Amino acid sequence: MPIISRRPVRLRRRRISFLFTAFLVGTILFWTLRALLSTRKDDNQKVLMEETKVEVPKANLNGSRPRIPHEKRAFASTTWSNHSISITSHVFHSSGLLELNKRALESQEHPIRILIKRSQQAWAEKLHRQSTTLLQAVNEYRKRHNDREPPLGFNIWWAYVKRNNVQLVDEYDQIWRDIEVIWGFGTDALNQSQQAFLENHAGDVYVLEKKSWNSPLEVSLGASKKMTLGGRLVVEMLRDAGVDAFIPPFKVIVNPDDRPIVQKDWALWNRAVNSARTGRVLLPSKRAGPRAPYGWRLSCDPLSPAWTTHVDYAPHEKPPFRDQPRTFIHDNARTMDPCQHPHLFRMHGQFLSFDHGRGPHLQQYDSDATESWVGVISFSPSRLHADLTAAIPLEWVQDSDLEDDEAVQRRHSHLVSHRSSHSRRWSLKSSDLRLHWRGTNTGMWHGDGMEWELGQRLRMMDMLQVNSDRAGKHTFPEPFVFPENLTILVEGEGEKVVSREQWTNAMMDVAFAGQPTSCSTEQGICDELWERYEWRRGVEREGVGRKRKFLLDVDGNAWSSRFKRLVSSGSVVFKSTIYPEWFMDRIQPWVHYVPVQVDLVDLWDAYAFLREGKNDELARGIGGNAYEWSRKFWRREDMVAYNFRLFLEYARAMSNERESMDYVYDPQDEV
C-alpha cells in the first residue's frame, strides 16, 4: 500500500520535471532562433533608432484623433535587441530636442559628435536630391504642394536661378507655409480684409504694389519714408535683377516694425488649410461673439503642450532652470515653436511683452467681425504668427574674399579657394578662445510693469556674466539666480561639476555695449540696468569675427541682424533664436552654426566640447562651412530668387483669376 502510493508520485514529479525542462529549452531555442533570424533587421534598426526622430502623432487637419500606425502601438512586436538599444540610446524627440541618455555615454560617441555627423549626412542628401531640369522642378513642386501646379512665371524664375547658380532650387517650403492658407479663402473676402486692415493701421504700415502688368513695382507711402527702407531695398533688388516685369499685379502690406503683427488663429488657419488642400474655400461667416481670452495658445493646436502643460504666469515668477534632463537641438525649426515648448512664453521678449507671456487676445488683429485672412510682410514672423517671410536685406553685407589676405588674393586669385582661404583665416584668429558677445539690452521694453528681467538678453547676462561687485540699486525685480556649480558634459569623462564663477570668468567675454536703451528713465530702470550689469565699449562690426573663433548670437527685438556678418567671418557661431528666417530650409544646424536653446541650458556643453583642443578641427570645419555657405547661399541673387518666387505665389493666390494663373510645362522652356 505505501509502495503503491509512492510510485505514482515519483512518476508525476519526474514527468513534471521533464516537461518543465523541455519547456525551458524550447523557450530558449525559440528566442534564440528569433534573434538570429532578425539580426539583419535589428542591425538596420539600430542605426534608425539612433538616427531617427521619435515622432509624436499630431492631430489631423479635420480635427479627428490621430491614427497611430501599428508599428508604433504599445503592443507592437519587438525583440530583446531592439529593447536593449532603446534603453541605451539618446532619444530624438519630435519637438526638435535630443534627450541625453546617460547610459549611452558609455557605449556611444559624445552626443554632439552624433549631431554633427547626422547633420552632415542630412545636408549632403539635401544637396544631392535637388532638381536639375525644369521638368524635375515642376514635378517636385507638385509633390510638395498637394499636386498643385507652379505659379505663372515659374519658368522665368527657373531661368533666373539657373543663370545665377542659385543652390537648393527645391527648398522653398517656407513660402508655401506662408501662402497655402490664403487659398482657403475667396479673393473677395481677402481683398476686403486687406482694405480693412489698411484702414485700421493707417500710418503704421505701408504697401508694396504692382498695379498692372505694365506698371512698375513700387512702394506706396503709408508709414514715414525712413520706415519703408526694407521694402525699397526689396524693390530695388528685383528691379536690378530685371525680374520685376514678370511678376503679375499684386498688392501686399508691409510692417516696418521689428516684430510681427498678425497672430495666427489656429482654428481658422486649420479650416482654411484643409479647404485649400481639397480645392475649396471657406464660405464668408460672421464671428459668433468675442474670442475667449486664451492669448498665445489660440495660435496652437489644442492637443499641443501649450494647452496641456502648466505654465506659471505669476508676475516676476522666475521659470525653473531646466538643466535636467540634458538636451540638445537636433531640429532647430521645431524648437522655435512655443506650442511645443511653452516655457518660451516666459523666457523671450516676443511673448513676455504681452500680458506676462499669456499673449494678446487677437481682438487687435481682427479687421472686422468677418472671418478672413490678411497677408502682411514682417521682418521676424514667429511660429505663432501668420506674417509673410521675405528676404529683406537689412544689415546684409557683401562678402569679399579680399578681406582674407589682400596681397595673396591679388597675386593668386585664381588659386585661392573659399576653403583654403578660410583655413588661413582660422589659423590667424586670436588665441583668445572665450565666447564673445556684445550688444544692447534690446528684446522688450524695460518699464511700465513689464517683466524685463525675464527677457532673453538679461537672462543671458545673469547666466554668463558673474561679477559679485556689481549690484543694482533696487532689489526688485530680482535678477535670475543660477546654481553656484555647473554640471558640464566632458567627452570621455561624463558629467563634471565645476564652479560657475570660475568657468564663466575664464571662458565668457559677454557684456552689454554702450549704455542702457529701451528703458524708462522716469522709473529709474535705466540707472538700475547701468548699476546691475557691466557695460563696455562697442566693437567694430567687421573686426570681431576676424579675431575670435567663438561668437554668440542672440535675438533682440527681432532676429539678430548681425548673423550675416558673423557667419561670413568663418568663426563658430552659437545661435539662439525663435525666429525662422527665409533661409531656414537652406541652412543646416551643426554644419553651418551651432544651435542653442533660448535659455542657453545647452550652451556650456556645446561650447566646452568645441573649445577643447582635440576638437579644434571640428570647430574649424563648422566655421569653414559657414564661411562657404555665406558666399554661396546668402548672396544678393539668392534673396532675389526667394522674393521673386514669393511674389509669384502671393500674386496668384490673391488674384481673382487665380485658377488660370498656373504655369504649364513646356519643354522649350528648359535652359
Image (spheres, helix red, strand yellow):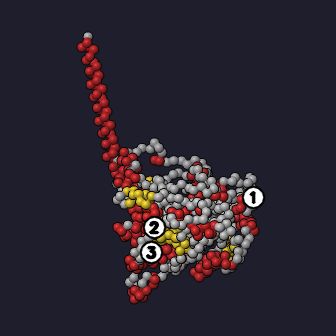
Kind of residue at badge 3? Arg
Residue 443's x, y, as percent? 60, 67
**Within 10 Å of the Cα at label 3, are there few (<14), some (14-19), or many (20+) other Cα atoms?**
many
Q: Residue at x 37, y 56 (%)?
A: 494
- Disc 3 secondary structure class: loop
Task: List the single residue furthest toward the top.
Answer: 1
- Disc 1 secondary structure class: loop
Q: Residue at x 28, y 32 (%)?
A: 21
**Between residues 238 and 314, which one lies in front from this camera angle?**
314
Kind of residue at badge 1? Ala
**Within 10 Å of the Cα at label 1, are there few (<14), some (14-19), or many (20+) other Cα atoms?**
few
Residue 130's x, y, as percent? 47, 68
Of the residues under marks 1 and 2, which one precedes in the sequence?
Answer: 1
**Between residues 334 and 285, which one lies in front from this camera angle?**
334
Residue 618's x, y, as percent? 38, 68
Is 360 situated above or below 208?
Answer: above
Kind of residue at badge 2? Asn
Of the residues under marks 3 and 2, which one precedes in the sequence?
Answer: 2
Query: According to the image, label 1 marks what residue?
Result: 369
Query: According to the image, label 2 marks what residue?
Result: 505
Q: Residue at x 29, y 22 (%)?
A: 12
Between circles 1 and 3, the one closer to the viewer is 3
Residue 598's x, y, as percent? 53, 62
Q: Residue at x 71, y 59 (%)?
A: 363
**Disc 1 to disc 3, how far (Cα)?**
54 Å
Query: According to the image, label 3 marks what residue?
Result: 548
